[in-house]
Amino acid sequence: MRIAVIGAAGRMGKYLIQATAEAEGVTLGAAILRPGSSLVGADAGEIAGVGKLGVAAVDSIQACAEDFDVLIDFTPPGLTIQNATACAQLGKAVVIGTTGLSDEEKNQLNALAEKTSIVFAPNMSVGVNLTLKLLAMAAEILGDDYDVEIVEAHHRHKVDSPSGTALRMGEVVAEALGRDLNECAVYGREGKIGPRTQKEIGFETIRAGDVVGDHSVWFATEGERIEIVHKASSRMTFAKGAVRAAAWLEGKKSGLFDMQDVLNLK
């Protein structure tokens, strides 16, 4: 599979280029920058700091349409939809790690998945997706007798809150408990809020420094507390997962998938 990385000069873009260069069974076919970037024409490997790879950076998907099979996209939500639309028109697969998509934008991805294959996940980490499986198992076993609280921490530059991963964790737990997260979620607490209700799922958010991503889910009842925790120390874990998803899409013509599909956890 020939991979194109969009946002190639960004933090995640550089990790994605490195992860692609190091992975077996895939190759870097294209590196895409923002239009007008001064780095257009530069070697993608040198942009990422991994040495020459023989791939000159371009400033649009159309400029490299013949050079890749699957696009990896961690750009902001509005751009992600534009990029996925362009790929669907070109018959290219897409791996999307963008967070903060609205319900309308998610519906647009569903529609685009009728034309091409898409892996969309709020977190591409293999460890996080195994954690989601563990959360579903815990919720099913513990049931309504345990209070559920989700605490997440990220770097000061993250723009959405709670994180897409925290929300997905909440969705997984809610589904296992037969609840609707839109109805039972509580985001932060302040003032005289009264006793906790039995079926709410709480979210707490921390933004500080350069935290890559910490998530902790509490299942607590009288006498004991279980915590399921995942901590990411490098963005490379997300990049490696995204490259694994890109390789998994080979031969798939259409459909909307997530990392649970990629890892055969369903």
Image: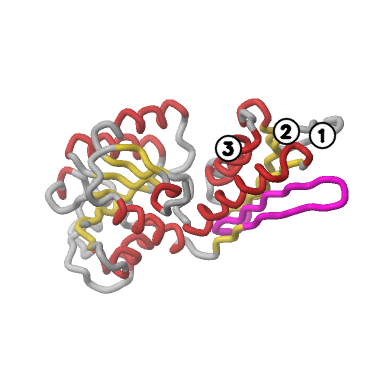
Give me the residue at 68% from left, 29% from top: 184
Query: What residue does disc 2 label?
Result: 200
* Quarter of the image where one finds residue 9: bottom left
Q: Dot 3: few (<14), some (14–19), or many (≥20) neighbours within 10 Å?
A: many
The span from disc 3 to disc 2 (Cα, nearest Å) is 12 Å
> Eyeballing the image, is 217 above or below 237?
above
Please name whichever residue, 165 or 44, is drawn nearer the observer in this view of the structure: 165
Going from N to C along the chain, the mark reached first, 3 or 2, is 3
Q: Which amino acid lies under the numbered mark 2 shown in the image of this protein?
A: Glu
Q: Position of residue 238 (x, y in %)?
A: 44, 57
Boundaries of the magenta span: 208-229
Q: Main secondary structure of the magenta part?
A: strand
Q: Residue furthest bottom?
A: 51
Whether residue 42 sits left or right of residue 109 in the image: it is left
Q: Dot 2: few (<14), some (14–19), or many (≥20) neighbours within 10 Å?
A: some
Q: Position of residue 126 (x, y in %)?
A: 47, 58
Query: What residue does disc 3 label?
Result: 171
Q: Position of residue 34 (x, y in %)?
A: 28, 47
Whether residue 15 sits left or right of residue 42 in the image: it is right
Q: Which amino acid lies under the numbered mark 1 shown in the image of this protein?
A: Arg
Residue 210 drawn in magenta: yes
Give me the residue at 55% from left, 50% from top: 133
